[in-house]
């Protein structure tokens, strides 16, 4: 059994890791830490976890000593300091935050507006469908953001294949409210005000996921790419849907593009490509990402959509997928649960 | 591996059986039938089931030939006719409808307003916490209604122990919209009209679950019991919460009653009793039933609450729990998934 | 034009008063105070009020000087101190909180657990359908709680008419989340945790509205009445639904009881009695209270339901109805807006 | 008093007209027709309208004889046939459907896939902020679609002013479920399936509103414009939010563009422009459209957002605004209600 630790485990990422790992046949959670709930049973933070006997430990690396894999779910500032001693202690580290997603610390600093405390540490960008080989050998993973996962899976075949003009990409994203996190929430997310409400919360290149999307697309294109990305919040708990627009480099039909996508993701268990337009609820509670697309021959643009569960393939599910790869297990181990319906 | 068939599998009960059984280590679904979707992959009815290769069969008992266990999920009229030939063919049968919940066919006829087509067949009422021994030997299970499961688990310790006056019981229920089923839905359940809306849909002893609740409570009390039961629908997808009121036969404190309940359900994996008031979301996607209670010494009444997922412990989860018992497996096999949060 | 002041106007009660009064042909808001938003336009607290030029004043009685009517919407502690100087300055005062709902200060202290700071001030209980004459002459109104309004309107004809046994009353309430208020909210009301969730938040005689319900029912019955009341919260923004149970003193049919109710509320514009079961959304944004009922001859109990908008007839709408009566206007002035649908 | 008739009044458009007109000081509804509810009180279709004594008439033009203004709310096929006889009878006609939105019948036929039955009738496109003068003299109005209203109000200042490249426009729209209408609804909109779900329902230039958006933008630009438009549905009842992207023709800052927009809409009561990003709930139940924007200097694109209530400024509110203009009333008469909050 793989011994797992989770630091900062009382947020939504931590709770989702506990849920997935409870079903994982090859891993067991040895320790889960929490600043707020230290010393209390996990069911105090997650009322549904009453059958789990686990108690939150102090949020200190001592708590995860002896673990093979440690997930960092306590936020960027914490992760930047924790990764190094954990790596030195021989743990594999998977960070759910942004600290180790960038190939250069200065990119992190530019998008997150604070100095990086471990600029010499290099993580692997943990999107298995694009970086599987590097993940296999990695000690430190920067687990991608939820929007970034969806946008990159939607755009990778187009951009890598040179199908679209690099300066034409627009990404429109919709997210459920759990994407806003559990700890820092204000009146905007009060049920009474969030219900029956929808809005864009960042526009014109100011959302932080823009940075990692551009880094990865530029790498796929071997050329600098800048995108317009607008995240929206809507009254649902889970789910991310991105709608990506790009101008085709040469005329193609929907079927042409669809074939390229189906080829690209042919052997990927967690990616489902079809002509049907994806719905977020078809991924809820699972590690799936569903992709659909269409070409508008009038405007010569392709529209590609991707749906996923922001806490599944967009966070904890993908983190466990990375763990499986790093450990040498079948990538789908413990991750085959289908979504809830309805 | 237990060979399982599901008849009428394209509704919410069928979909939930498919979801749970996909995680079950000792059972596999050989056939799932559907009138509407015969010949189509299950993902046409349940978009999230894209990874499952299963195709719906014609809704005919030939399709489930050779199955060890058959679940009937296609509605009462269908179940009444299907049970007998399946039993004769050697299958164990678990009916998700009401046809085999009553000890006498005339009770069924009174509450459901139609003649029973197999009045000679006797099912066992499939509430394991009350009827485990009979279920072990049963060939035919009448799987309880969702409200009835919650109300009976909430009231059984009180009524069996003679703690309350038999004529004082009031049961108030709240249900998510999936309880209304998938096939016969009208304008009431249009999202635009159901959202931001709550109402009671049956009052004054007219809801059909009243019958099975009274049957089981009367059996526990060894006396005829009639209850007032009001079901309400509120804008959520899953979840049942019942709030039960009864006058105490003798003065007791909250702690007194709590101890009796904790004793009663001490060895039950799926029942969690605590002073904390239960919330439906803490059971969402699981097979748990959470119970809380309090005594009002001013009025000498006890209030007992029970929360469960109407498609889990209130339907498909409980059906699989029954299957496990009938087959001789550990009751919790394949049913330990914790709820989604948030 | 009636000159109106609102103190503590940046919560949900204050916002709803601003909304209703903006449509009132005989009243204008001269001042709205707020601790949090003093000096800022009202649209900073209520983004939809961009067309209103009003700016929040400091939360001080100086701000409402010269007003004919002042609404107190800033919470009980504030109201207890503000009422006296406002009355001395010649204002009519309508308190949306609980401070002046009780006929004795000790009742307030018992239910609210704090000393009353103006125990000598007597308010009139502002439920026009029961206290219209006293309201006409009142200077100080204790505007009823939302659950209390619904429960009293549902039970008054029964209790006043002696139709039911006084010790048999059970009240089950469902409320939208706006009932929890705007200022003191925690993780429970985070959209991600409240969505798809339902629970009872007080049981066994511990919710504060129990006190005012019992006071008014006892007065109607000329006998001490104690009730069992359980409030539930469900994932919707507005709406209260109460389901009340009581044992009939003598056998009656649904039609018998219905006629008594229709007679009782015959001339009431805001009360609609019918056999149809009321739905909260049919009152959303209006000042209506819809009542339905049924008798279960098997148990000899009557079930009466009442639905209203907790911010309308359950709070701000009713407060303006009280203002109209106190000022001598037609009671429905400015209050005839029908509910939003859908 | 203006005498008003509404044909096809039992859908969401009709219900919203009834709600708004009940508050209108200069208009009264003489007749409301319905195929489904003919002969029944309007409260049978809209449970909240219990205080209105109106009864649905047969859906025949005889019912609206003598009306000054007739709203057609019964769908495109009906409207195409009804407009001519009503105009001949001297009524002013406002069609809530698409039949009279296009300057040529062939455009209608291309987007709606059916022959136009009154191709010789020319309507005025009823967007007052762009066509006020023509509306003043019009007898027949084609009331714009909800998405089209939002997109055109968001883009008009840019496109008319030549600020953006005509071939660069991408429009991403989000709508509540009431936009899908009341009469033709299927499993997709079942609360249990629509809740916690989001998806795009038309992509790549196939949604019908694309046609009227392109017609009006082309007219503003005096050049043929084609756009990419993707409508999404999310789990809320009311509300449209569009996010529009376009490449700037020359470098500009956010403040530059904002000033142009504020100038453009300076005297418009129903349009509110600000740097704050608009939220749909801030328009709920009102006739407002709120606009926000930002320039991304990295990509040289401007993002403009517009939020409105799809049944308000997106349908019935705008239709009444058109009526006011046609009749010579102040445009805001009866339309000043502020949105519900929360």
Image (spheres, coloured by chain):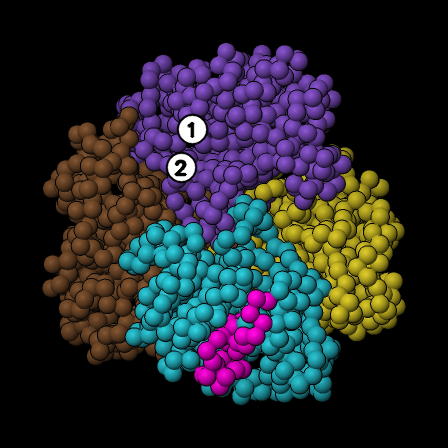
Chain colours: A yellow, B purple, C brown, D cyan
* Residue B175 image point, x, y percent: 46, 39
Q: Which residues are magenta?
A: D116-144
D206 drawn magenta: no
In the drawing, what numbered circle is on residue B231? 2
Residue A107 in view of the camera = no
Q: How far apart are labels 2 and 1 at the CA level?
A: 9 Å
Near-viewer residue (D328 or D309):
D328
Label 1 sits on a secondary structure element that is: helix
Disc 1: which residue:
B209
Instruction: Please tell me how crowded label 2 is: few (under 14), some (14-19), or many (20+) other residues with Cα within 10 Å.
Output: many
Residue C296 in view of the camera = yes
Label 2 sits on a secondary structure element that is: strand
D136 drawn magenta: yes
D220 left or right of C320?
right
Q: Is residue A86 above or below residue A41?
A: below
Q: What residue appears at the point 43 percent right and 68 percent down from the top-left corner? A: D71
Q: What residue appears at the point 59 percent right and 74 percent down from the top-left corner? A: D102
Labels 2 & 1 near each other (Cβ < 8 A): yes
């Amino acid at each position: 059994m793989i011994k797992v630790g989770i630091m900062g485990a009382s947020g939504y990422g931590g709770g989702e890791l506990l849920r997935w790992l409870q079903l994982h046949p090859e891993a067991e959670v040895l320790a889960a830490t929490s600043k707020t709930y230290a010393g209390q049973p996990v069911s105090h933070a997650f009322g549904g976890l009453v059958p789990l006997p686990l108690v939150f430990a102090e949020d200190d690396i001592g708590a995860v000593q002896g673990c093979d894999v440690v997930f960092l779910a306590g936020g960027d500032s914490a992760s930047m300091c924790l990764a190094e001693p954990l790596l030195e202690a021989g743990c594999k580290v998977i960070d759910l935050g942004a600290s180790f997603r960038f190939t250069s610390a200065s990119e992190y600093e530019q998008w997150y507006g604070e100095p990086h405390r471990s600029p010499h540490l290099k993580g692997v960008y943990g999107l298995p469908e694009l970086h599987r080989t590097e993940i296999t050998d990695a000690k430190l993973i920067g687990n991608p953001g939820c929007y970034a996962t969806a946008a990159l899976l939607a755009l990778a075949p187009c951009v890598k294949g040179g199908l679209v003009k690099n300066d034409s990409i627009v990404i429109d994203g919709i997210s459920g409210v759990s994407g806003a996190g559990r700890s820092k929430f204000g009146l905007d997310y009060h049920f009474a005000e969030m219900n029956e409400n929808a809005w864009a919360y960042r526009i014109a290149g100011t959302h932080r996921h823009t940075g990692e999307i551009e880094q990865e697309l530029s790498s796929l294109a071997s050329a600098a790419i800048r995108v317009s990305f607008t995240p929206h919040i809507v009254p649902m708990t889970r789910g991310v849907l991105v709608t990506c627009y790009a101008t085709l480099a040469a005329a193609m039909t929907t079927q042409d593009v669809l074939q390229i996508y189906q080829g690209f993701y042919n052997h990927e268990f967690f990616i489902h490509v079809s002509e049907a337009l994806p719905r977020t609820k078809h991924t809820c509670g699972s590690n799936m990402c569903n992709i659909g697309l269409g070409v508008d021959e009038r405007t010569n643009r392709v529209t590609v959509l991707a749906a996923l569960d922001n806490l599944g393939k967009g966070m904890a599910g993908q983190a466990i997928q990375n763990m499986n790869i790093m450990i040498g297990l079948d990538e789908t181990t413990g991750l085959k649960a289908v979504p809830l319906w309805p």
